[in-house]
Amino acid sequence: MSHYTVAAAAALVGLFTHRATLKLKDVFDALFPPREGDQHADALGRDASAVVPRITSLIPEEVTVGTDTVPVEIVADHASDQVTVAVDGEETEFERLPSGNLRFMLEAGLRAREGTVEVILKGDAGISEPARLVIAP
């Protein structure tokens, strides 16, 4: 088999890769239909705003009572451009970092008392499960 034959076969395969991938997706969707609410269902083709956001972690997870200004970073999945951040039920201003994470400043009133603070994301598709930030002595 010559190099030209291999190159021609590779070119033909490359021309139809997208179509073959879509056909395989159709076959697998027919054989294994995605469940309702499955976050991985059609994740490649789905608009991020159509999936409920999910907080995977907070950085830091714990803050000492009375600490000065505290930036809190939210690591999240499916945090679309329309997402809002709520801290203890109050919408809070935040910035989107180049990494895709979100960062907000923890208010002085929340840093002044011991306990936990709930952080949630609100998106077009729904509200995330709360993440808890511990305010420790």
Image (tube, grey):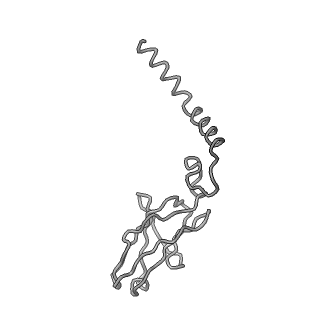
User: Residue 75 location in percent, x, y?
Assistant: 43, 63
Of all residues, the one furthest to the top in this rendering is 1
Q: Residue at x 59, y 48 (%)?
A: 42
Q: Is residue 97 above or below residue 117?
A: above
Residue 73 sits in which quadrant? bottom left
Number of numbered callouts drawn: 0
Residue furthest to the front in view is 31
How far across and how far down the image is residue 25, in percent? Answer: 60, 40
Which of 23/68 is in front?
Answer: 23
Residue found farthest to the right: 30
Instruction: Indicate left or right for 51 with 70 as reference.
Output: right
Q: Residue at x 59, y 53 (%)?
A: 47
Q: Quadrant of the N terminus?
A: top left
Is 3 above or below relative to 108?
above
Q: Is residue 46 left or right of residue 136?
A: right
Q: Is residue 19 above or below residue 37?
A: above
Residue at left offset 42%, top offset 66% = 57
Which quadrant of the figure contains the C terminus? bottom left
Find residue 9 and report its horizontal and vertical position in percent: 49, 20
Where on the picture, by quarter, is residue 72?
A: bottom left
Task: Name the residue at 54% across, 62% down.
Answer: 53
**x then y, percent, for residue 99:** 41, 57
Image quarter of residue 126: bottom right
Left or right of 74 on screen, residue 28? right
Q: Is residue 74 above or below residue 47?
A: below
